[in-house]
Amino acid sequence: MMPTTPSALHSRHLPMVYLVDDEEVVRDALAWLLRSRRLLSEGYGSAEAFEAMLDARPGQARSGWPDAPSCLLLDVRMPGMSGLALFERLIERGLVDALPVIFLTGHGDVPTAVAAVKRGAFDFVEKPFSDNALVDRVEQALQLSERAIASRRQHGQLTQRMAELTEREREVMSLVVQGLPNKLIADQLHISVRTVEVHRARVFEKMNVKSAVELSNLLREG
């Protein structure tokens, strides 16, 4: 198994399309097609080879992968592990949001591919396929991946900010987002209004917000 393009390019957080098909001629044709639209790709000759690539990543890198917009073009029928079996494993790893899967199917595989879409696959494309239509779907999948990665990153930042709050600051924050004024917060927590003001200011600073409304929106979206 050899990447179609240098992995160093992917380290710059450029979009990447992964190709998993047991036919080298198909992988080469897909890689050429993607290059014509300025898209990078990496090819793997089996589901096992692709999964081995995932397993070879360090634990921390694995949990944050992919960190650039990505999608997977996956053949349904291959020797050894099938594309559908690999897809199920990707679901177990929690990867299909950030790594949308487009199945490449023969006519007889269409019912299987339709079932996979119901399980969360992005789409299926029947062979022989329209080059432009396929790449259009790839680009849409990459956009979906980008949004999922941004959401995951935002959630991670929110979790990190929350971890920096003291227990008292969390108590104050909970009451602030409920819309309680400082006087009522002070009464509920049996502390002075001035102390509430100090904790409130620290919560805003640590959570990087400027108002209770902004804080509420942040917590709701996170």
Image (tube, helix red, strand yellow):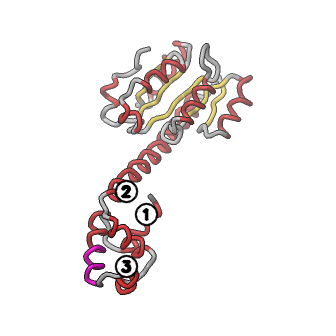
Residues at badges 2 and 3 in contact (C-beta under 8 Å)? Answer: no
Front residue of 182 and 81 = 182
Residue in the image at 46% along x and 48% along y = 147
Front residue of 179 and 69 = 179
State which region is magenta.
193-200
Of labels 2 and 1, earlier in sequence is 2
The residue singled out by tag 1 in the image is: 219
Residue in the image at 41% along x and 28% along y = 40
Residues at badges 2 and 1 in contact (C-beta under 8 Å)? Answer: yes
| Magenta stretch, main secondary structure class | helix
Of labels 2 and 3, earlier in sequence is 2
Q: Residues within 10 Å of mark 1 (few under 14, many from 20)?
A: few
Q: Which mark is residue 158?
A: 2
Q: Is 133 placed above or below 25 here?
A: below
Of labels 1 and 3, earlier in sequence is 3
Residue in the image at 40% along x and 23% along y = 56
Query: Residue 34: x and y, percent?
Result: 46, 27
Local secondary structure at mark 1: helix
Horizontal placement of 107 versus 121: left or right? right
Quadrant assignment, res 190: bottom left
C-alpha separation, residue under disc 2 versus residue under disc 3: 25 Å
Q: Is 168 placed above or below 51 here?
A: below
Query: Residue 99: x and y, percent?
Result: 49, 36
Badge nearest the viewer, 2 or 3: 3
| Residue projecting furthest to the front | 190
Q: Magenta stretch containing residue 7, yes or no?
A: no
